[in-house]
Image (cartoon, grey):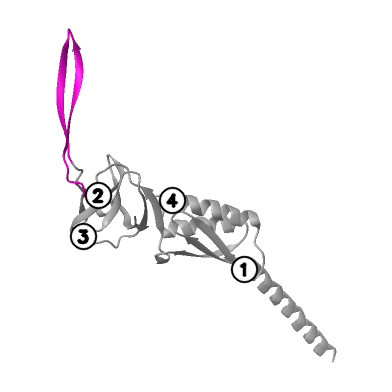
Amino acid sequence: MKSRSWLIIGIIIIGIIAASGFILTQENSVEITLETNGTTVDIQPSSLFSIPPQMEAEMQEKALIDVQDPDSTVESVKRDIKAIAKKYNYTADVTIKSQFGTDQLPMPATVSGTSMVPTLEDGQEIIVLKTDDYKVNDIVVATHPEYGMIVKRLKKIEGNKVYLMSDNRKVEVYTTETALGNGMVEVETIKKTPLDTWLPKENIIGVVKEY
């Protein structure tokens, strides 16, 4: 009889320990939904227990920086959010949602220059979907070794390279004058042609979806 009582007590203790472990595990797990349209970010945590407000604030701040970073990816954004959760002893499962679907990452950009007139104007705000799923005639944003981030129309795909062209085909001609002294002036005629360029596929950041 005594042994049976001890057995029951043992089972109860094991049950309490197991339940405590379950509660602890659940308490330290959180599902994070990161909603973004490319310009704003909203962190939505889902957990059995309240998460620290500071943790949520850090996630919000870091997510906004990441979304606007040309070098970020879906994987890198999730990794950064998980790292913040880990700092607070939480394990996070992260999902990104945007106007383009689940785990589709948009990025804001501003057009600089007139090379894509009349399609895109100088100073125009655009939204880029970071993706390697593009096709001929898409407007894409890419990194150029000399000019930095550029927006062009994709005209050719050959092997691991793409050919990008400006929509604006106008050649601008202007002159500059340089004083040489003794009343003499050197006049130089300059032709500014549209930038058309071959780039590696890996240089494409994404496709312009909203403009």
Describe the element under mark 3 as helix, strand or loop. Answer: loop
Tell me what residue is drawn at x 43 percent, y 50 percent. Answer: 68
* Circle 2 residue: 118
Residue 206 against residue 22 in the figure, above or below: above
Task: Point out residue 22 in the picture as x, y percentages from the top left corner.
Answer: 66, 74
Specify the amino acid type for callout 3.
Answer: Val
What residue span does the magenta drawing correspond to?
A: 166-193
Looking at the rendered structure, the kind of residue marked 4 is: Gln
- The relative height of residue 116 versus residue 44 in the rendered view (above or below) is above
Q: Between tags 3 and 2, which lies in front?
A: 2
Q: CA distance from mark 4 to mark 3?
A: 26 Å
In the picture of the structure, the residue carrying the numbered disc 4 is 68
Residue position for label 1:
47
Assign a secondary structure to mark 4.
loop
Q: CA distance from mark 1 to mark 4?
A: 27 Å
Q: Locate the N terminus and report the quarter of the image it occupies.
A: bottom right
User: Is 176 part of what is drawn in magenta?
Assistant: yes
Q: From the top left corner, tell me how far across and down residue 29 is, in percent.
A: 60, 67
Residue type highlighted by circle 1: Ser
Lower sequence index among marks 1 and 3? 1
Q: Which residue is mark 3?
A: 136
Cα gap from disc 4 to disc 2, whole angstroms: 26 Å
Label 2: how many Cα within 10 Å (few below 14, some 14–19, many 20+): few
Q: Is residue 151 left or right of residue 16?
A: left
